[in-house]
Image (cartoon, rainbow, N blue to C red):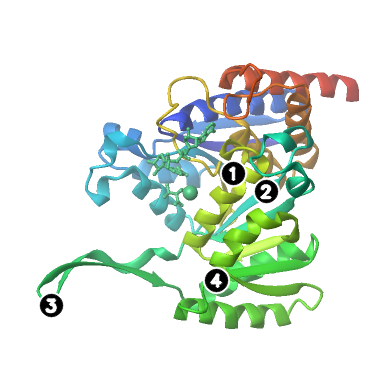
Amino acid sequence: MKKTIALLPGDGIGKEVVDVTVEILKAVAEHFNHQFQFNYGLIGGTAIDQKGNPLPQETIEICKQSDAIILGAVGGPKWDQNPVELRPERGLLALRKELDLFANLRPITTFESLLDSSPLKREYVNGVDFVIVRELTGGLYFGKPSERVVKDGEDAVVDTLFYKRKEIERILVTAFEIAGKRRKHVTSVDKANVLESSRVWREVAEEVAARYPEVTLEHMLVDNAAMQLIRSPRQFDVIVTENMFGDILSDEASMITGSLGMLSSASLSSTGLHLYEPIHGSAPDIAGKNQANPIATILSAAMMLRQSFGMEEEAKAIEKAVDNVLNSGARTADLANDEKAISTTQMAEEIKNAISDDHAIIN
Ligand code: NAD
Ligand code: IPM
Ligand code: MN
């Protein structure tokens, strides 16, 4: 198969993890006889530095001419004091909006060999397998007004949590569709005891649930959900929630797996052009040191192969290679307790070799 993949490495470790993921994809292409063409685009701080814009039009065009997009991460201290329009994060948010990437799927599954790497006890994290469906193009992130104001003669500030009913509906439908193919349980997380937006969210969740009689719906307040993720994470199958709640809960949930550097994601679009990205950021504290865990991005590439290209066998080959390499004891610094840590590039090299080895056996 011939596919065009847009690569948006971004800033900090984003570049490092995307670089090595490309090597993995080249290995997959070779072993399974595909042709992947990679088109690079600028986003974030790097785009600000080179083009004066965190999301140049050219980058949007590169994305639109591709079959799928892989993004590293954006942001860093260099740009933290910039005016809002010139912040790296602005580029990522604008891309999500421009491409209508409204459903961010963040799977949380534990690897057997990492059960003791989680700060949570092994017996709690063993067998965890759920997905957070995070609404990605609305809510607090995009509501207007969002600005400093003067109220009653005093300096004040306003952010707005805004949703059209249809936007709530489509993310819930996505969650129910996914749950229907899994263990058929949706936990809708909100703050309905305080927020009107959450009360409407609950109404819509009930309406959508009525269309999926085989799927059970549970409502959970977000503060309780934050606690339940630690207390008994196995209870979850599909969590669906508002943009900002999903952002926070998914970083929390990543520690069930042992590291933020393990969590992949797919940002699905209404148009069929989807974006795949690790959930972590640009990690300025380790950027440029060849220390970052590339597995989140490598697993995001596997999600791309499965979801966008229908390449199930190829996706599995990557996932199996990651599992085999972790089983062998290889660890980047975020997961290496007492063991010796290997670098980003070494980890990717091992995963690449594991794909080749495995494929050689199949043939
Ligand atoms: P972060 O996710 O970049 O890092 C948090 C901590 O996790 C750091 O200690 C970091 O070293 C570690 N970490 C993250 N990814 C890792 C990996 N793959 N391997 C090993 N360790 C890893 O979050 P932050 O420090 O709060 O934010 C830094 C910058 O990244 C900010 O500018 C923020 O806006 C941006 N950010 C971008 C994205 C994105 O592009 N999707 C996501 C989150 C944060
Ligand atoms: C993420 C990030 C982004 C978000 C930032 C960089 C805008 O934290 O992808 O989770 O909050 O959505
Ligand atoms: Mn985040």
Is residue 337 rendered to the left or right of residue 85?
A: right
Q: Mark 1 points at which residue?
A: 67
- Mark 3 or 2, which is nearer the eye? 3
- In contact (CB < 8 Å): disc 4 and disc 3: no
User: Which mark, by number, is residue 316?
Assistant: none
Q: Is mark 1 on a helix, strand or loop?
A: loop
- Mark 4 or 1, which is nearer the eye? 4
Q: Which of 311 and 255 is in front in this view?
A: 255
- Mark 3 or 1, which is nearer the eye? 3
Q: Mark 3 points at which residue?
A: 152
Residue 113 rendering spot, x and y as whole percentages: 77, 32
Reading the chain from its start, which is encountered first: label 4 or label 3? 3
Quadrant in which the N terminus appears: top right
Q: Which residue is drawn at 77% across and 72% down?
A: 215
Q: Is mark 4 on a helix, strand or loop?
A: strand
Residue 270 rendering spot, x and y as whole percentages: 57, 61
Q: Name the residue under label 2.
A: 108
Residue type of the residue flagged with mark 4: Asp
User: Which mark, by number, is residue 190?
Assistant: 4
